[in-house]
Image: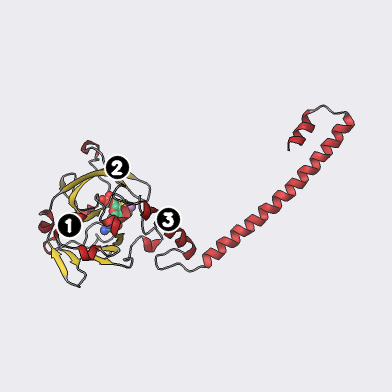
Amino acid sequence: MANIFKNIFTKNSPKESLRTKLNIDQLIVKKTIVSFFFFFVLMGAGFWGWKWLRHQRADADGARPQLRAVLNTNEKIFSALLSDNHLAKEYPLSEAVKNVRVNGRDGLRTPLDSANWRLNVIRKNGDTLALTLDDIKKLPKTDIVFNFKCIEGWNQITHWGGVKFSDFVKAYGLNQETSMKYMGLVTPDKGYYVGIDMPSAMHPQTILCYEMNGKPLPLDQGYPLRLIIPVKYGIKHLKRIGTMFFDNKKPGDFWAERGYDYFSGL
Ligand SMILES: Nc1nc2c(c(=O)[nH]1)N[C@H]1C(S)=C(S)[C@@H](COP(=O)(O)O)O[C@H]1N2
Ligand SMILES: [Mo]
Protein backbone atom coordinates (compact mmCIF):
# COMPACT_ATOMS: atom_id res chain seq x y z
CA MET A 1 0.00 0.00 0.00
CA ALA A 2 2.72 2.44 1.06
CA ASN A 3 4.48 1.73 -2.23
CA ILE A 4 1.44 2.62 -4.29
CA PHE A 5 1.23 6.03 -2.64
CA LYS A 6 4.96 6.52 -3.04
CA ASN A 7 4.61 5.73 -6.75
CA ILE A 8 1.70 8.14 -7.13
CA PHE A 9 3.25 11.02 -5.28
CA THR A 10 6.88 10.82 -6.40
CA LYS A 11 7.68 12.46 -9.70
CA ASN A 12 8.72 9.80 -12.20
CA SER A 13 9.79 10.07 -15.80
CA PRO A 14 6.71 9.84 -18.15
CA LYS A 15 7.66 6.30 -19.13
CA GLU A 16 8.10 5.21 -15.54
CA SER A 17 4.84 6.76 -14.43
CA LEU A 18 2.94 4.96 -17.22
CA ARG A 19 4.40 1.69 -16.00
CA THR A 20 3.42 2.54 -12.44
CA LYS A 21 -0.12 3.36 -13.58
CA LEU A 22 -0.43 0.00 -15.35
CA ASN A 23 0.75 -1.72 -12.19
CA ILE A 24 -1.81 0.11 -10.13
CA ASP A 25 -4.61 -0.78 -12.57
CA GLN A 26 -3.61 -4.42 -12.41
CA LEU A 27 -3.47 -4.27 -8.67
CA ILE A 28 -6.94 -2.74 -8.50
CA VAL A 29 -8.37 -5.45 -10.75
CA LYS A 30 -6.70 -8.13 -8.68
CA LYS A 31 -7.93 -6.68 -5.37
CA THR A 32 -11.46 -6.28 -6.74
CA ILE A 33 -11.58 -9.91 -7.81
CA VAL A 34 -10.28 -11.05 -4.44
CA SER A 35 -12.79 -8.81 -2.63
CA PHE A 36 -15.71 -10.14 -4.66
CA PHE A 37 -14.57 -13.69 -4.12
CA PHE A 38 -14.61 -13.24 -0.33
CA PHE A 39 -17.85 -11.28 -0.52
CA PHE A 40 -19.64 -14.19 -2.20
CA VAL A 41 -18.01 -16.84 -0.03
CA LEU A 42 -19.08 -15.02 3.16
CA MET A 43 -22.55 -14.26 1.78
CA GLY A 44 -22.94 -17.96 1.00
CA ALA A 45 -21.68 -18.96 4.45
CA GLY A 46 -24.05 -16.50 6.13
CA PHE A 47 -27.02 -17.71 4.10
CA TRP A 48 -26.15 -21.37 4.67
CA GLY A 49 -25.71 -20.70 8.42
CA TRP A 50 -29.06 -18.94 8.59
CA LYS A 51 -30.82 -21.78 6.73
CA TRP A 52 -29.19 -24.34 8.98
CA LEU A 53 -30.26 -22.44 12.10
CA ARG A 54 -33.82 -22.16 10.77
CA HIS A 55 -34.01 -25.92 10.44
CA GLN A 56 -32.91 -26.54 14.01
CA ARG A 57 -35.77 -27.34 16.34
CA ALA A 58 -36.71 -24.69 18.91
CA ASP A 59 -36.51 -25.89 22.53
CA ALA A 60 -39.38 -25.93 25.03
CA ASP A 61 -38.43 -22.40 26.04
CA GLY A 62 -38.92 -21.18 22.45
CA ALA A 63 -35.31 -20.69 21.32
CA ARG A 64 -33.19 -22.82 19.02
CA PRO A 65 -30.57 -24.82 20.94
CA GLN A 66 -27.64 -22.93 19.41
CA LEU A 67 -29.11 -19.57 20.41
CA ARG A 68 -30.30 -20.94 23.75
CA ALA A 69 -26.69 -21.97 24.40
CA VAL A 70 -25.73 -18.31 24.11
CA LEU A 71 -28.55 -17.32 26.49
CA ASN A 72 -27.49 -20.02 28.96
CA THR A 73 -23.92 -18.76 28.90
CA ASN A 74 -25.16 -15.22 29.53
CA GLU A 75 -27.26 -16.58 32.36
CA LYS A 76 -24.24 -18.23 33.98
CA ILE A 77 -22.24 -15.03 33.76
CA PHE A 78 -25.03 -12.82 35.08
CA SER A 79 -26.14 -15.14 37.91
CA ALA A 80 -22.52 -15.23 39.04
CA LEU A 81 -22.50 -11.44 39.09
CA LEU A 82 -25.72 -11.26 41.07
CA SER A 83 -25.25 -11.01 44.79
CA ASP A 84 -26.66 -9.09 47.71
CA ASN A 85 -23.98 -6.51 47.02
CA HIS A 86 -25.46 -5.88 43.62
CA LEU A 87 -28.26 -3.48 44.48
CA ALA A 88 -30.44 -1.68 41.97
CA LYS A 89 -30.03 2.07 42.32
CA GLU A 90 -32.68 3.71 44.52
CA TYR A 91 -34.07 7.22 44.08
CA PRO A 92 -35.66 9.87 46.31
CA LEU A 93 -39.47 9.69 46.58
CA SER A 94 -39.79 13.04 44.78
CA GLU A 95 -38.44 11.46 41.58
CA ALA A 96 -41.16 8.81 41.34
CA VAL A 97 -43.59 9.41 38.45
CA LYS A 98 -47.28 9.94 39.25
CA ASN A 99 -48.66 8.41 36.04
CA VAL A 100 -47.29 4.92 36.07
CA ARG A 101 -47.46 3.19 32.73
CA VAL A 102 -49.58 0.05 32.44
CA ASN A 103 -48.02 -2.70 30.35
CA GLY A 104 -49.17 -6.27 29.80
CA ARG A 105 -52.59 -7.62 30.75
CA ASP A 106 -52.02 -11.34 30.38
CA GLY A 107 -53.58 -13.09 33.34
CA LEU A 108 -55.55 -9.94 34.24
CA ARG A 109 -58.39 -10.25 31.74
CA THR A 110 -60.40 -12.59 33.96
CA PRO A 111 -62.43 -10.57 36.51
CA LEU A 112 -60.82 -10.70 39.95
CA ASP A 113 -62.83 -12.30 42.74
CA SER A 114 -61.28 -10.08 45.44
CA ALA A 115 -63.34 -11.48 48.34
CA ASN A 116 -62.03 -14.98 47.69
CA TRP A 117 -58.55 -14.03 46.59
CA ARG A 118 -55.76 -15.79 48.49
CA LEU A 119 -52.04 -16.06 47.98
CA ASN A 120 -51.68 -19.84 47.67
CA VAL A 121 -48.23 -20.93 48.71
CA ILE A 122 -47.56 -24.58 47.86
CA ARG A 123 -45.26 -25.99 50.49
CA LYS A 124 -42.63 -28.64 49.86
CA ASN A 125 -44.79 -31.32 51.55
CA GLY A 126 -47.68 -30.47 49.21
CA ASP A 127 -49.72 -28.45 51.73
CA THR A 128 -51.14 -25.12 50.62
CA LEU A 129 -50.80 -22.03 52.75
CA ALA A 130 -53.74 -19.79 51.79
CA LEU A 131 -52.99 -16.22 52.88
CA THR A 132 -55.23 -13.16 52.82
CA LEU A 133 -53.92 -9.72 51.93
CA ASP A 134 -54.15 -8.81 55.64
CA ASP A 135 -51.89 -11.75 56.54
CA ILE A 136 -49.30 -10.20 54.24
CA LYS A 137 -49.88 -6.59 55.33
CA LYS A 138 -49.23 -7.60 58.97
CA LEU A 139 -45.56 -8.17 58.12
CA PRO A 140 -42.97 -5.34 58.18
CA LYS A 141 -43.43 -2.97 55.24
CA THR A 142 -40.71 -1.74 52.88
CA ASP A 143 -40.84 0.96 50.23
CA ILE A 144 -38.65 1.17 47.16
CA VAL A 145 -38.20 3.79 44.44
CA PHE A 146 -36.22 2.46 41.51
CA ASN A 147 -35.95 2.64 37.74
CA PHE A 148 -38.42 0.06 36.36
CA LYS A 149 -37.15 -1.26 33.02
CA CYS A 150 -39.20 -2.99 30.35
CA ILE A 151 -37.48 -5.15 27.75
CA GLU A 152 -39.41 -3.22 25.06
CA GLY A 153 -37.16 -0.25 25.74
CA TRP A 154 -39.00 2.08 28.14
CA ASN A 155 -38.17 2.75 31.75
CA GLN A 156 -39.53 4.92 34.54
CA ILE A 157 -38.77 5.72 38.16
CA THR A 158 -41.59 4.28 40.24
CA HIS A 159 -42.49 3.86 43.90
CA TRP A 160 -43.72 0.54 45.34
CA GLY A 161 -44.49 -0.76 48.82
CA GLY A 162 -44.89 -4.22 50.32
CA VAL A 163 -43.09 -6.93 52.26
CA LYS A 164 -39.59 -8.06 51.41
CA PHE A 165 -39.80 -11.58 50.04
CA SER A 166 -37.00 -12.63 52.42
CA ASP A 167 -39.02 -11.30 55.42
CA PHE A 168 -42.07 -13.19 54.16
CA VAL A 169 -39.99 -16.39 53.97
CA LYS A 170 -38.83 -15.89 57.58
CA ALA A 171 -42.31 -15.10 58.88
CA TYR A 172 -43.90 -18.18 57.30
CA GLY A 173 -40.95 -20.55 57.81
CA LEU A 174 -40.39 -21.28 54.12
CA ASN A 175 -36.73 -22.27 54.49
CA GLN A 176 -37.21 -25.78 53.09
CA GLU A 177 -38.98 -24.27 50.11
CA THR A 178 -36.39 -21.57 49.43
CA SER A 179 -33.56 -24.08 49.58
CA MET A 180 -34.81 -25.14 46.15
CA LYS A 181 -33.47 -23.51 42.98
CA TYR A 182 -36.55 -21.71 41.68
CA MET A 183 -39.79 -20.04 42.68
CA GLY A 184 -42.75 -20.08 40.30
CA LEU A 185 -45.55 -17.47 40.32
CA VAL A 186 -48.84 -17.85 38.47
CA THR A 187 -51.87 -15.55 38.09
CA PRO A 188 -55.18 -16.95 39.47
CA ASP A 189 -56.37 -17.71 35.90
CA LYS A 190 -52.93 -19.14 34.90
CA GLY A 191 -52.77 -16.65 32.01
CA TYR A 192 -49.33 -15.32 33.03
CA TYR A 193 -46.56 -17.10 34.88
CA VAL A 194 -42.90 -16.58 35.68
CA GLY A 195 -39.98 -18.53 37.08
CA ILE A 196 -37.48 -16.78 39.34
CA ASP A 197 -34.08 -18.17 40.36
CA MET A 198 -33.90 -18.31 44.16
CA PRO A 199 -30.95 -15.92 44.66
CA SER A 200 -32.93 -13.21 42.81
CA ALA A 201 -36.12 -13.99 44.77
CA MET A 202 -34.22 -13.75 48.08
CA HIS A 203 -32.43 -10.58 47.00
CA PRO A 204 -32.97 -7.79 49.60
CA GLN A 205 -34.83 -5.55 47.11
CA THR A 206 -37.38 -8.17 46.00
CA ILE A 207 -40.84 -7.45 47.42
CA LEU A 208 -44.32 -8.91 47.46
CA CYS A 209 -45.92 -5.61 46.59
CA TYR A 210 -49.40 -4.30 47.49
CA GLU A 211 -48.90 -0.54 47.13
CA MET A 212 -47.97 1.89 44.39
CA ASN A 213 -47.30 5.56 45.22
CA GLY A 214 -48.46 4.89 48.80
CA LYS A 215 -51.91 3.58 47.75
CA PRO A 216 -53.29 0.07 47.17
CA LEU A 217 -52.22 -1.28 43.77
CA PRO A 218 -54.60 -0.38 40.95
CA LEU A 219 -56.32 -3.43 39.39
CA ASP A 220 -54.36 -3.23 36.14
CA GLN A 221 -51.13 -2.85 38.08
CA GLY A 222 -51.63 -6.16 39.85
CA TYR A 223 -54.05 -5.66 42.77
CA PRO A 224 -54.03 -7.24 45.29
CA LEU A 225 -50.44 -8.50 45.13
CA ARG A 226 -47.63 -8.42 42.58
CA LEU A 227 -43.93 -9.10 42.45
CA ILE A 228 -41.42 -6.24 42.37
CA ILE A 229 -37.95 -7.52 41.59
CA PRO A 230 -35.68 -4.56 40.73
CA VAL A 231 -32.75 -6.78 39.65
CA LYS A 232 -34.84 -8.00 36.70
CA TYR A 233 -36.63 -6.65 33.66
CA GLY A 234 -40.37 -5.87 33.84
CA ILE A 235 -41.43 -9.22 32.33
CA LYS A 236 -40.57 -10.92 35.66
CA HIS A 237 -42.64 -8.51 37.84
CA LEU A 238 -45.78 -10.66 37.72
CA LYS A 239 -49.00 -8.78 38.49
CA ARG A 240 -51.86 -10.41 40.45
CA ILE A 241 -50.09 -13.36 42.09
CA GLY A 242 -52.41 -16.32 42.64
CA THR A 243 -50.07 -19.21 43.35
CA MET A 244 -46.47 -19.45 44.51
CA PHE A 245 -44.53 -22.71 44.28
CA PHE A 246 -40.95 -23.92 44.51
CA ASP A 247 -38.95 -26.34 42.39
CA ASN A 248 -35.45 -27.41 41.49
CA LYS A 249 -36.48 -27.45 37.82
CA LYS A 250 -37.16 -24.21 35.95
CA PRO A 251 -40.85 -23.34 36.33
CA GLY A 252 -42.74 -22.42 33.16
CA ASP A 253 -42.18 -18.82 32.12
CA PHE A 254 -44.52 -16.94 29.78
CA TRP A 255 -41.92 -14.84 27.95
CA ALA A 256 -39.08 -17.40 28.07
CA GLU A 257 -41.45 -19.73 26.19
CA ARG A 258 -41.72 -16.96 23.58
CA GLY A 259 -37.96 -16.74 23.11
CA TYR A 260 -36.90 -14.18 25.72
CA ASP A 261 -34.08 -14.75 28.18
CA TYR A 262 -35.22 -16.82 31.18
CA PHE A 263 -32.98 -15.00 33.64
CA SER A 264 -33.75 -11.48 32.32
CA GLY A 265 -31.41 -9.92 34.86
CA LEU A 266 -30.27 -6.32 34.89
N1 LIG B 1 -50.04 -10.67 35.04
C1 LIG B 1 -49.17 -9.99 34.29
N2 LIG B 1 -48.08 -9.44 34.84
C2 LIG B 1 -47.21 -8.75 34.09
C3 LIG B 1 -47.38 -8.62 32.68
C4 LIG B 1 -48.53 -9.23 32.12
O1 LIG B 1 -48.78 -9.18 30.90
N3 LIG B 1 -49.40 -9.89 32.95
N4 LIG B 1 -46.48 -7.92 31.93
C5 LIG B 1 -45.13 -7.71 32.50
C6 LIG B 1 -44.39 -6.67 31.81
S1 LIG B 1 -43.81 -7.05 30.27
C7 LIG B 1 -44.09 -5.46 32.38
S2 LIG B 1 -43.07 -4.34 31.64
C8 LIG B 1 -44.64 -5.09 33.70
C9 LIG B 1 -45.34 -3.75 33.63
O2 LIG B 1 -45.85 -3.38 34.87
P1 LIG B 1 -46.86 -2.16 34.94
O3 LIG B 1 -48.05 -2.49 34.07
O4 LIG B 1 -47.22 -1.99 36.38
O5 LIG B 1 -46.09 -0.97 34.39
O6 LIG B 1 -45.56 -6.05 34.17
C10 LIG B 1 -45.17 -7.38 33.98
N5 LIG B 1 -46.12 -8.21 34.68
MO1 LIG C 1 -42.23 -5.45 29.79
38 left or right of 162? right
Name the residue furthest top: 11
> Secondary structure under badge 2?
loop
Q: Are marks 2 and 1 in contact (CB under 8 Å)?
A: no
Q: CA distance from mark 2 to mark 1?
A: 23 Å
* Outermost residue toward the right in this view: 15
From what the image shows, is residue 214 above or below residue 138? above
Query: At which x and y percent is residue 27?
Result: 78, 43
Q: Residues within 10 Å of mark 2 (few under 14, many from 20)?
A: few
x then y, percent, for residue 152 = 37, 50
Q: Residues within 10 Å of mark 3 (few under 14, many from 20)?
A: some
Dividing the picture into quadrants, the one containing residue 179 is bottom left
| Residue marked by disc 2 | 89
Q: Is mark 3 within 8 Å of ligand 2?
A: no
Instruction: Report which residue position mark 1 lands on.
Output: 168
Residue at point 29%, 55% (across, down):
200
Mark pair 3, 1: CA separation? 30 Å
Residue at (28, 59) in percent of width and height: 198
Q: Secondary structure at mark 1?
A: helix
Crowding around mark 1 (Cα neighbors within 10 Å: few <14, some 14 to 19, many 20+) is: some
Q: Quadrant of the N terminus?
A: top right
Amino acid tagged 1: Phe
- SS for callout 3: helix
Q: Is residue 210 visible?
A: no
Q: Residue 124 versus residue 193: which sits nearer the camera?
A: 124
The residue positioned 22% from the left and 55% from the top of the image is 226
Q: Which residue type carries mark 2?
A: Lys
The answer to whether residue 218 is left or right of residue 76 is left
Q: Is residue 237 left or right of residue 52?
A: left
Residue 17 quadrant:
top right
Quickly name the residue at label 3. 74
Precedes in sequence: disc 3 or disc 2? 3
